[in-house]
Amino acid sequence: MILVAFCLHPAFRYNPIGCPMNPTPSETQTPLPHLQVELDKLKACIHCGMCLPACPTYRATGSEAESPRGRLYLMKKLLEGELQPEAVSPHLEQCLACHGCETVCPSGVQYGKVLLGTREDLAQRDTSFKRRFKRYIFQHVLPNHLLLVIGGALLRFYQRSGLRNLVRKLKLLKPFPQLEYQERLLPDVPARKGLPIGIIFGDLGGEPVSLLTGCVMDIFYNPVHWDTLEVLVANGYRVTVPEQQCCGALAHHAGETDITRELARLNIDDILQSNPKWIVVNSAGCGSTLKEYGHLLAADTRYAQKAEEFASKVVDVMELLAKKPLAPFKNYGMYEKITYHAACHLYHVQKVKNEPVELLAQIPGIELVPLENAEACCGSAGIYNVEQPALSTEILATKMGHIKTVCQKTGATTLATGNPGCHLQLEKGIRETGLPMIVRHPISILAQAYRVPQASPPADKGTS
Ligand code: SF4
Ligand code: SF4
């Protein structure tokens, strides 16, 4: 019923594939064209194995086929026709696409591009219902912001009306373990206050920046956008929120890159119109895909140049703020120990490594305490935690072990991270382990330091 409603509903803006029950044009068998394009990157591997200890799935399974070197070998054999997609796909699906292997590779293998090119080729050959359904979600649900807002409001009602407590108390989801797991993964949805499109905030003479709000981020962590706006304005930027689409990061991650390209064209047309100096993002996963628009549209003669221009303007908000000295803070009343988890798509892909910690360390009263293996994946990885719950849970348990150690040894009470996927995954880990910590986006901590401290209410002296 839900699928039929999806197919018929006029609110969906574009529908080149139609109902997921119908064949898609992309089913035409092709000789792995996207993997072929990345062949030089594949060949750069010298099989040294230095990436193995950095790979979370290899560490969890001990299997060569679940390591970067093993997966590169499988992709090579696929290209040479010695292995069939059915033999290779499961190992590529178990990859987090965390890019952790790239950071340690002495040969500079761009593993992520090889992997995502191959995923795209394999997705195009896959005619299963599951793949069509996922494709439908990426193409018609995530880019439909109104639908997401309604879904978020319903979810908030479910969580706050007592329904969630009832469902959990009566164990109504127990017969559906996958659904039960997903329900526990969801963060508490905040009251959403949409950012007005096209309004100018801040100093009219400041550097013009466009703020991206995304799809999932705007529902689950909407207050982070207001915090971002506040910090940018405090630092003299002229900020607007442009008309925009979902960036297509989740689709790209899953190999549905033609959908990402279509969304990229719409975003380029909408956002470049106002000629911003910077296109600012506060979600690491979105930022890394937006920075890849040039690569993704390199073969599109109409868009290649515009896509390069667009990608060159994209910055993570922490990366932008680190370019100049921060404006003076207002609030000197914060005393807190904070530890930082580096989102893979910020650290390994965008190479924004030290900026968040260096910016937070400037707030008087904040003490940064290091987290062991801070740059190791938490197991969220797009929709990996939904699709691969067992491995994701194991990888999260390793991460939580390090977080527990730092919390108990230092008394850190806040875990900072700059990606919505990591945020919800780590919140789940903290809820389940019962650690006395909260997860916050670094920009929210900075925003707090730019607010005038509230005057404390006068002490109650009693009536006698
Ligand atoms: S570290 Fe790089 S070159 Fe060495 S096996 Fe891994 S991917 Fe290949
Ligand atoms: S991207 Fe991450 S999970 Fe995949 S092979 Fe590289 S290190 Fe392992």
Image (cartoon, helix red, strand yellow):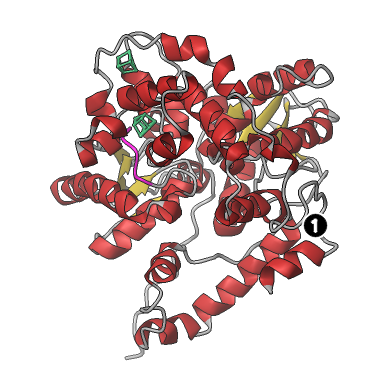
- In screen coordinates, is 177 left or right of 215? left
Residue at the front extreme, as displayed: 82
* In the foreground, 409 or 18: 18
Is residue 358 located in the magenta-colored stretch of the structure?
A: no
Q: Which region is colored magenta?
A: 375-379
* In the foreground, 98 or 60: 60
Q: Quadrant of residue 130?
A: bottom right
x 62%, y 74%: residue? 154
From the top left corner, tell me how far across and down residue 78 is, in percent.
Answer: 45, 25
Q: Amino acid at mark 1?
A: Phe
From the top left corner, tell me how far across and down residue 341 is, in percent.
Answer: 35, 39
Q: Residues within 10 Å of mark 1 (few under 14, many from 20)?
A: some
Residue 359 appears anywhere in the view = no
Magenta segment main secondary structure: loop
Task: Give the quadrant of the N terminus.
Answer: bottom right
x 78%, y 32%: residue? 265
* In the foreground, 433 or 325: 433
Quadrant holding ligand 2? top left
Looking at the rendered structure, the secondary structure element under dot 1 is loop
Q: Quadrant of residue 124?
A: top right
* In the foreground, 99 or 423: 99
x 58%, y 31%: residue? 121
Task: Give the quadrant of the C terminus.
Answer: bottom left
From the top left corner, tell me how far across and down residue 409 is, in percent.
Answer: 13, 46
From the top left corner, tell me how far across and down residue 384 is, in percent.
Answer: 43, 48
Is residue 376 located in the magenta-colored stretch of the structure?
A: yes
x 36%, y 8%: residue? 107
Residue 248 appears anywhere in the view = yes
**The residue at label 1 has a CB less than 8 Å from ligand 2:** no
Residue located beneath label 1 in the image: 12
Residue at the left extreme, as displayed: 409
